[in-house]
Amino acid sequence: MSIEQRPAHPGNYTRGRTAKIDRIVVHVADGTYGGTLSWFAQDAAPASAHYTVATDGRTGQSVQEGDTAWHAGDWQMNARSIGIEHEGMPSRGPWTPSAAQLQASARLVASICQRHGIPADRAHIIGHSDVNPDRKARQGCPGPTWPWDAYLNMIRESLNPAPQPGHMKDGQEQRPVRFFDPRTNQQVGEGTLIEGTDKVYLKVTK
């Protein structure tokens, strides 16, 4: 997917990481796509997120994944997570993400899960309100109308695409394979290798 690079001001995030990335935090910006990216780029904004997804599916990156964005209102969660803002105006009334926005966000999250070995489940892909539910300002982020079940299903479909007709030849065998993080020797996923090719259909371990 195409990602627009819109760097945040260096004073709005922390260089590097102090913890392993194992969470993705979903936000709604209460602002426009362009306005959110511009805000992160200003030196007056003590906040940032790694990505912002527009209602039409455009995606911008403000902070690199190897750096710590200030998005969760909790330093420990910031240190271990990637934050994704979504264009929207929930303060003006009931809000739900558009189909294009949800699909783009799901593809983005799937790619992040692949890179960092994050399970595609509700324990690891969370809302801002899950981080600090007692703060009134965060109770609506991403809000009660966020379609969690559909969103997680879209992420899993991106991670585990069904083989399409014509992708496998008659009699072609499949072999299960496992993926390991070379730094920790811990299993991070599994998949199916199509014999005679270099193609693997990835299935992330739940």
Image: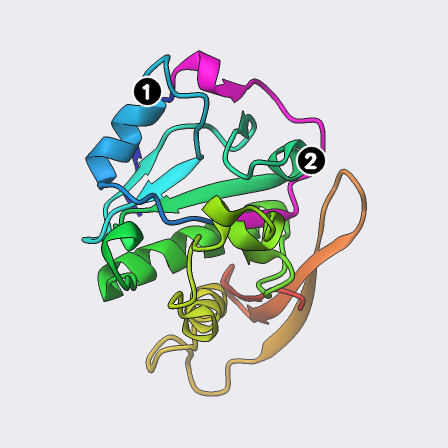
Above or below, 200 against 58 in this view is below
Q: Secondary structure at mark 1?
A: loop
37 vs 118, left or right, is left
Outermost residue toward the right in this view = 185
37 vs 72, left or right, is left
Q: Please state which amino acid type lies under the numbered disc 2.
A: Gln
Residue tagged 1? 41
The residue drawn where x is 43% and y is 44% is 84
Q: Which residues are magenta?
A: 9-25
Viewer-nearest residue: 177 or 30? 30
Magenta stretch: includes residue 63: no
Viewer-nearest residue: 159 or 80? 80
The residue drawn where x is 61% and y is 68% is 191
The residue drawn where x is 29% and y is 61% is 97
Viewer-nearest residue: 202 or 34? 34
199 vs 118, left or right, is left
Above or below, 126 against 68 in this view is below
Tag count: 2
x and y, in percent, of residue 184 in the image = 80, 42
x and y, in percent, of residue 163 in the image = 42, 77
Q: Please state which amino acid type lies under the numbered disc 1.
A: Ala
Residue tagged 2? 76
The residue drawn where x is 50% and y is 48% is 136
Residue 162: quarter of image:
bottom left
x and y, in percent, of residue 20 in the image = 70, 38
